[in-house]
Image (tube, rainbow, N blue to C red):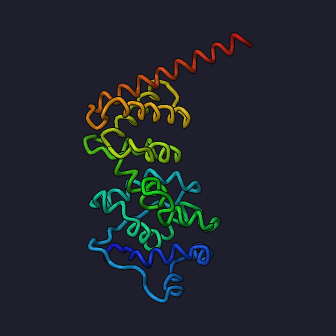
Amino acid sequence: MMMPFLKTDDMNTVKSNVSSFADHFAEDDNTWLQKELGRNIFSDSKFPMPQVLLDMSNDVPDKTDPVNVQAVYNAFQFLSDSQASDERLWSALCLGPFWTYVQYRWKVRKNHSKENILQHYFFGFGARRSLTRNAMSRLWWTGRLTYDKTDSDPYHLTRFVTQNARFIVDILERNTANNPEVLRPFIQAVIDAQNRGIPVSSERMRDLEIYLDELGGIYILDCLPEQKIHDRILKKAEELAKKDEKATDTEDINK
């Protein structure tokens, strides 16, 4: 069996008729596609289809992200960045072999609105944002940008990012995430900050991302050593923590 993909016209036909097809997305399988369109819309790619078993056992679907990112990236690691940016590939996988997974992860049976379908089966936003919203490309790109082959535990950054669904959005959708050699030291610095007892909330994460963007306006981040990026981010996390402590002390005094 070969990996499926959708021809552009067939993909756009489904997308343009999502409002009419919406109720079908709550069905157990995708056989309705051929009935509605009168033909098989899936074409074979040049790649054999890997065997991928995704975890759908948790009552809280996002808790399965860490293991499923690893499963998908391991299986499809042969894709180039260009191939992995193609909506036709991911839409075919969502509508085809991983139909049940997309329903499970994004609760499509309960919420088969046009917005939910376009966002998670197709590319419902701009190119960059869509890669982390489509149900399957999201898993692959999370692995691609956080996998560290030089580490004895190559997925340790992946596990951190996937422990909070907001982290995937907040970290991976920024322009600085385009380069794993910039992203990896950033994530490691956040992990090290937490290991030092510095809390990193979603709000604090965004502060650090803004600071990374500011560094990008001063330096060519792609040319900076990873250790320097790491040290700058860690230092900033420490400074922000001290600022928070000082503000708290001031509030206590004024009470």
Residue extending furthest toward the front: 217
Q: Position of residue 161 (x, y in %)?
A: 45, 43
Q: How many marks?
A: 0
Which quadrant of the structure image shows residue 54?
bottom left
Residue extending furthest toward the bottom: 38
Give the quarter of the figure containing the C terminus.
top right
Q: In the rendered image of this protein, does residue 56 appear above or below residue 207?
A: below
Residue extending furthest toward the right: 255
Q: Position of residue 155 (x, y in %)?
A: 35, 45
Q: Residue at x 32, y 78 (%)?
A: 44
Does residue 9 appear to the left or right of 179 in the view shown?
right
Which quadrant of the structure image shows residue 193?
top left
Q: Residue at x 72, y 11 (%)?
A: 254
Q: In the rendered image of this protein, does residue 218 appear above or below residue 110?
A: above
Q: Position of residue 119 (x, y in %)?
A: 53, 61
Q: Nearer the viewer, residue 197 or 3?
A: 3
Give the quarter of the figure containing the N terminus.
bottom left
Q: Nearer the viewer, residue 159 or 182?
A: 182
Q: In the rendered image of this protein, does residue 58 appear above or below residue 255?
A: below
Q: Residue at x 52, y 22 (%)?
A: 241
Which quadrant of the structure image shows residue 17?
bottom right
Does residue 157 appear to the left or right of 200 in the view shown?
left
